[in-house]
Image (cartoon, grey):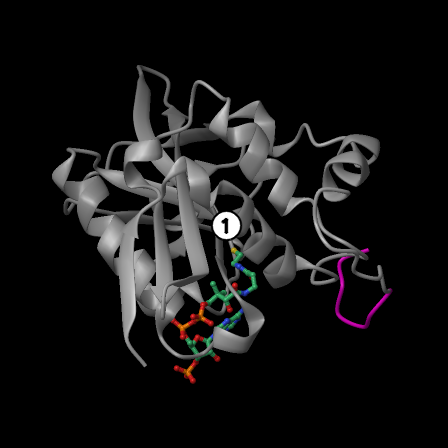
């Protein structure tokens, strides 16, 4: 299987959002909002389109990743870093290394662009294999002062977060996804049934 990673073009938007829908559908709750998040993120001032990459197999998009600016607020300063999300791979193509390829390639781009660290909310069993550790190691909490397994970060330059004790913030777009707007936007894509499944958050 030949996988190529390339920049995203406007004409890819529908396909990348549809892959996002398929990857997240019924994963954390019945349905999903991540495809609408991608749509909203593209219009957000924090969005960093230069780091968006799609994965293609035989000319078909099977995965993608999106980055945006984020911050750590210490007592003394506001440090600009990046976050990513969603990262997704079409279900039929998962566990073939594509997520890892998208991640490695874009982490290198972000590093070359001069960003010193990445902080995310993500799958606690997946990202440690790519070097992420929980943010309590850096003395960084969420904006509400919390730490948990899904809240992880990585220094792109050794020691970059050594003096970054503080609070993490990301674009409000991540939390501002009203269910009725998500449902309306979802009508652009083929119907999928919302199911309550074991292992969902809610
Ligand atoms: C998470 C995701 C992006 C990983 O991409 P991928 O191409 O499937 O992953 P890779 O092939 O690079 O890595 C595969 C390895 O990671 C593991 N893995 C994949 N998804 C995982 C998850 N959610 N939790 C724990 N481990 C996971 C696989 O078991 C596999 O392990 P192995 O190498 O020991 O067999 C993809 O599975 C996906 O889109 N999932 C649904 C959406 C999602 O959860 N996105 C991440 C949100 S933070």
Q: Residue at x 25, y 50 (%)?
A: 107
Q: Is residue 11 above or below residue 103?
A: above
Give the main secondary structure of the magenta stretch. loop
- 39 sits left or right of 184 in the view: left
Spot occupied by residue 75 in the image (x, y as percentages of width and height): 37, 17
Spot occupied by residue 185 in the image (x, y as percentages of width and height): 73, 36
Residue nearer the viewer, 161 or 3? 3
- 106 sits left or right of 48 in the view: left
Residue nearer the viewer, 55 or 69? 55
Residue nearer the viewer, 108 or 63? 63
Which structural element holds mark 1? helix
* Residue 6 lies in the magenta stretch: no
Q: Quadrant of the N terminus?
A: bottom left
Residue nearer the viewer, 5 or 133? 5
Q: Is mark 1 within 8 Å of ligand 1?
A: no
Q: Is residue 2 visible?
A: yes
Spot occupied by residue 183 in the image (x, y as percentages of width and height): 80, 40
Q: Residue at x 64, y 38 (%)?
A: 36
Spot occupied by residue 148 in the image (x, y as percentages of width and height): 56, 52
* Residue, disc 1: 16
For label 1, the crowd category at 10 Å Cα-Cα, with few meaning under 14, some 14 to 19 and many 20 or more, is: many
User: Total of numbered circles in the picture?
Assistant: 1
In the image, the segment drawn in magenta is: 196-202
Q: Is residue 199 above or below residue 118?
A: below
Q: Residue at x 70, y 32 (%)?
A: 177
Q: Is residue 90 above or below residue 36?
A: below
- 63 sits left or right of 162 in the view: right
* Residue 199 lies in the magenta stretch: yes
- 98 sits left or right of 158 in the view: right
Q: Is residue 195 above or below residue 12?
A: below
Q: Residue at x 77, y 43 (%)?
A: 187
Q: Is residue 143 visible?
A: no
């Amino acid at each position: 299987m030949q996988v190529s990673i390339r920049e995203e073009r406007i004409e890819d938007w529908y396909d990348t959002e549809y892959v996002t829908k398929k990857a997240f559908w019924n994963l954390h709750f019945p349905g999903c909002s991540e495809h609408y998040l991608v749509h909203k993120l593209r219009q957000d001032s924090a969005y960093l389109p230069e780091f968006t990459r799609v994965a293609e197999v035989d000319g078909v998009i099977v995965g993608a990743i999106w980055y945006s600016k984020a911050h750590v607020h210490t007592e003394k300063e506001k440090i600009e870093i990046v976050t990513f999300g969603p990262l997704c791979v079409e279900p039929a193509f998962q566990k073939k290394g594509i997520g890892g390829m998208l991640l490695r390639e874009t982490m290198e781009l972000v590093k070359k662009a001069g960003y010193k660290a990445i902080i995310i909310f993500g799958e606690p069993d997946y990202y440690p294999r790519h070097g992420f550790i929980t943010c309590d190691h850096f003395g960084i909490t969420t904006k509400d002062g919390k730490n948990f397994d899904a809240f992880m970060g990585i220094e792109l330059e050794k020691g970059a977060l050594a003096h970054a004790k503080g609070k993490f913030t990301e674009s409000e777009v991540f939390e501002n996804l009203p269910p009725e707007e998500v449902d309306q936007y979802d009508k652009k894509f083929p119907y999928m049934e919302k199911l309550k499944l074991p292992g969902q958050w809610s």
